[in-house]
Image (cartoon, grey):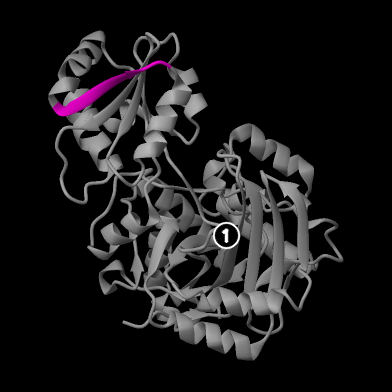
Amino acid sequence: METTVIPFRGLRYNTTEVEGIANVIAPPYDVIKPEERVALEAHHPANIIRLILSQPDPNDTDDANQYTRAARLMNQWITDGTLVRDATPRYYIYDQSFSAPDEKSYTRRALIGLVKLEPFENRVVLPHEKTHAGPKADRLNLMRECHANLSPIFLLYADTDGDIERIMESFTDEHPPEVDCEERFGSTHRLWSLNDAERNTEIQTLFSERPLLIADGHHRYETALAFQEEMAHTGLQGYGYMMVNLVRMESPGLAVLAIHRLLDNLSPDSITHAITKLPEVFEVHEVDTQATLMAQLEALKGKSPAVGMYTADHNYRLLIPRSTIPGQLDVTLVQETLIKEIFRVETLADHISYTAYADDAVAHVKGKSDRVALLMNPTPVEQVLEVAMAGSTMPQKSTYFYPKMATGLVLNLLNW
């Protein structure tokens, strides 16, 4: 089936009413800690956090609650000119510049547009992770009240020749950004409004034969599908689309980090059993320091599956499987073989957490006899696409596309 990515009339902060867009943007809703939410609310009365994470109240009812308050505030900002909708459809170009934990500098370029919603079985928009019901219910309630995409999800597209990025570059070379934010949330942010019908037509045509891979936003995509079904009776086409950030998967600006696994609440017996059983499944190499372990993992990236392990007795181990299944991912090896079989963890939610930082993983375990850190290489984007194209899914938290993109640069109203 054909992929449809169209320009749209974005709803944006009015720079004549809001001084400094940096004051009103926020990280995505699902990574914001409670204390960060409070700080963002205090930072500016029109910060997007007041829409994406409106808070419940003990006196809430079905007709007056956190979701209705978010909708009322959004409509108030539209009425008073805080938010203004662009007059004509266009794409938006979003550059995010940052330093990754590997200390390399990146600029990741995204095209913001609307993608036509397609069920996963149509193989147009491809998932690579399973989802849970809770986050979808929350976002669906917010969408029902606001009738808007308050933040885009993150999709990847393949473009070996770089044709789409070349069109974007031809525009950004000729025009200054409309938004140029100083550093916020570990990045600087620049936005162009690609109000050029000829270029937009070229871009739309180039996307028509390209499947899209969800990098981040599985829950919100499934929520949009559910809301589309609910609103089918209206006949409005806007409910059949959602706002997305589209990034070329071959781009040098795409930084993919590993997500390390932290095991908690383990019994002494399960740890003793695991350490005893490891040599049956893995070549076990004792390593002297964290730095050495991470360097050895890095050296094996793309060549052999490998996992690092750190235990509370200050032992570092490099684990290399004695036999492998062709195409098996490191994250699958860790979850199915190490965590479930060797550590005998059956209920993952009770025993596992995640971090992208090896230092944090080791610090989490030090001195805690019921904890183990499993240190990983990042999952290559090509492997993620292969899994998705095959109709399979990966364990949760298999990829971390660093950093998260800002919320609040562009919004999308659905009722058109």
When asked about the image quadrant of residue 175, the answer is bottom right
Q: Quadrant of residue 101?
A: top right
When the figure is inspected, residue 213 is found, relative to residue 22, above or below; the finding is below
User: As shown in the figure, which amino acid type bears the numbered disc 1?
Assistant: Ser
Magenta segment = 281-288
Mark 1 highlights which residue? 151
* Residue 72 image offset from top left, x and y in percent: 66, 59
> Where 287 sits versus 247, above or below?
above
116 and 200: which one is in front?
200
**Which of 382/338 is in front?**
382
The reply to whether the magenta stretch includes residue 410 is no
Residue at 21%, 51% (x, y): give it.
327
Q: Is residue 282 magenta?
A: yes
Helix, strand or loop at mark 1: loop
Q: Position of residue 382 (x, y in %)?
A: 35, 58
State the image coordinates of residue 4 (x, y, percent, origin top left). 44, 80
157 vs 114, left or right, is left
> Which sits in the foreground, 384 or 307?
307
| Whether residue 399 can be seen here | yes
